[in-house]
Image (tube, grey):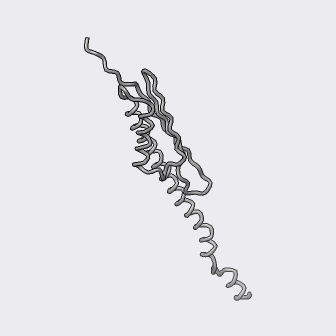
């Protein structure tokens, strides 16, 4: 039996390199997915806060859709528009009901991945009535 040949067959030199070629891209992909989920979650929270504040401005007795839109823009400017991009704000008010929708996309950490963000807030319009 040729011991040099057996030793070459059982030799594991280079095994760590081939394992790292498989493990490191998988590990980095998991880290990027976690970062993308965090950015999306933050963008959803920004959209929820924006729609809630805009709804509060629209629902008051003499509030208008323009007031809600201004409030939404103010809140977005305060919270930062970085995580929430391509924002579209829709404000509707009738005599009895008000509704605000905020749509956009979360900032992309992973190339070519565009996660949508959609929030909606609605409620009755405040009306003061004289006491009977």
Horizontal placement of 31 versus 96: left or right?
A: right
Residue 17 position in % (x across, y down): 62, 75
Asked whether 44 or 74 is in front, the reply is 74
Which residue is farthest top? Answer: 132
Quadrant in the picture for the C terminus: top left
Asked whether 117 or 20 is in front, the reply is 117
Asked whether 22 or 116 is in front, the reply is 116
Asked whether 55 or 8 is in front, the reply is 55
Residue 14 position in % (x across, y down): 63, 78
Up/down of 41 relative to 128, above or below: below
Residue 103 position in % (x across, y down): 52, 40
Up/down of 6 relative to 52, above or below: below
Name the residue located 46 percent from the left edge and 43 percent from the top edge.
Answer: 47
Tally of numbered tags: 0
Residue 123 position in % (x across, y down): 41, 27
Q: Where on the picture, by quarter, is residue 27?
A: bottom right
Q: Where on the picture, by quarter, is residue 22?
A: bottom right
Horizontal placement of 103 versus 11: left or right?
A: left
Up/down of 4 relative to 112, above or below: below
Name the residue located 43 percent from the left edge and 21 percent from the top edge.
Answer: 95
Name the residue located 60 percent from the left edge and 57 percent from the top edge.
Answer: 111
Quadrant in the picture for the N terminus: bottom right
Up/down of 61 relative to 2, above or below: above
Horizontal placement of 4 versus 16: left or right?
A: right
């Amino acid at each position: 039996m040729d011991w040099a040949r057996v030793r070459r067959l059982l030799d594991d030199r280079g095994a760590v390199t081939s394992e790292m070629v498989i493990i490191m891209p998988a590990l980095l992909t998991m880290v990027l997915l976690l970062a993308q989920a965090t950015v999306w979650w933050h963008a959803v929270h920004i959209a929820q806060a924006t729609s809630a504040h805009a709804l509060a401005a629209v629902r008051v007795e003499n509030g208008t859709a323009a007031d809600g839109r201004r409030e939404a823009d103010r809140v977005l400017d305060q919270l930062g528009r970085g995580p929430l991009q391509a924002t579209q704000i829709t404000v509707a008010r009738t005599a009895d009901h008000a509704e605000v929708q905020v749509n956009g996309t979360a900032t992309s950490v992973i190339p070519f991945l565009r996660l949508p963000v959609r929030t909606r807030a609605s409620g009755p319009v405040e009306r003061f009535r004289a006491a009977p």
